[in-house]
Image: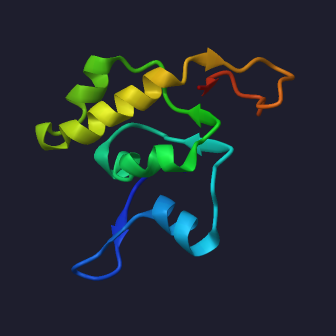
Amino acid sequence: MDLGTGSYSTKHEFSPLRHLRTQYGVKYLDYVIITHPHRDHIDDIFEFNEMTPRTLLRPNHLTQADIVGGNKPSDSAKVQKYLEISNSYNVNITAGSDSDASASNHWVA
């Protein structure tokens, strides 16, 4: 859930997605959930495509202006990547499908 990052020393930023790939051999994710697109929740967004997620759950009621306005200008590259990814997940999952998790705003690429 979410794509935040952390640090485990003063010199190394921790990438949860990279850690899953390199330490546990995880090659893909079934679901990714982004609760809201602020920097602390999308910091690891550039690793997203490496995990080839099938389904993305995110607050799709937010406009691009809402998302850009809710972030600092210095985070524009991450925000733009989030918007690019969000826009590519544009097929609504229907009830009873293989990806159905009984939620109405799951979308697949």
Left or right, 103 with reference to 107: right
Residue at 22% x, 81% y is 10
Q: Quadrant of residue 31?
A: top right
Q: Which x, y percent locates residue 98?
A: 83, 30
Q: Residue at (47%, 63%) from the top-left corner?
A: 18
At a point 62% along the width and 23% down the height, the residue shown is 105
Q: Nearer the viewer, residue 85 or 1?
A: 85
Q: Residue at left 41%, top 64%?
A: 15
Give above or below for 84 relative to 53: above
Looking at the image, is 16 positioned above or below residue 75? Answer: below
Q: How many marks do you count on the picture?
A: 0
Going by the picture, which residue comes out furthest to the right? 96
Q: Where residue 85 sits: x, y (%)?
A: 44, 31
Residue 89 percent location from the top left of the image: 54, 24
Compare residues 37 and 27 and report the one nearer the observer.
27
Q: Quadrant of residue 86?
A: top left
> 4 above or below 7?
above
Left/right placement of residue 104 relative to residue 20 reads: right
- Residue 105 higher or lower than 10, as above or below: above
Q: Residue furthest bottom?
A: 9
Q: Position of residue 67 (x, y in %)?
A: 30, 27
Q: Nearer the viewer, residue 57 or 90?
A: 90
Position of the C terminus by quadrant: top right
Q: Quadrant of residue 96?
A: top right
Chosen colour scheme: rainbow
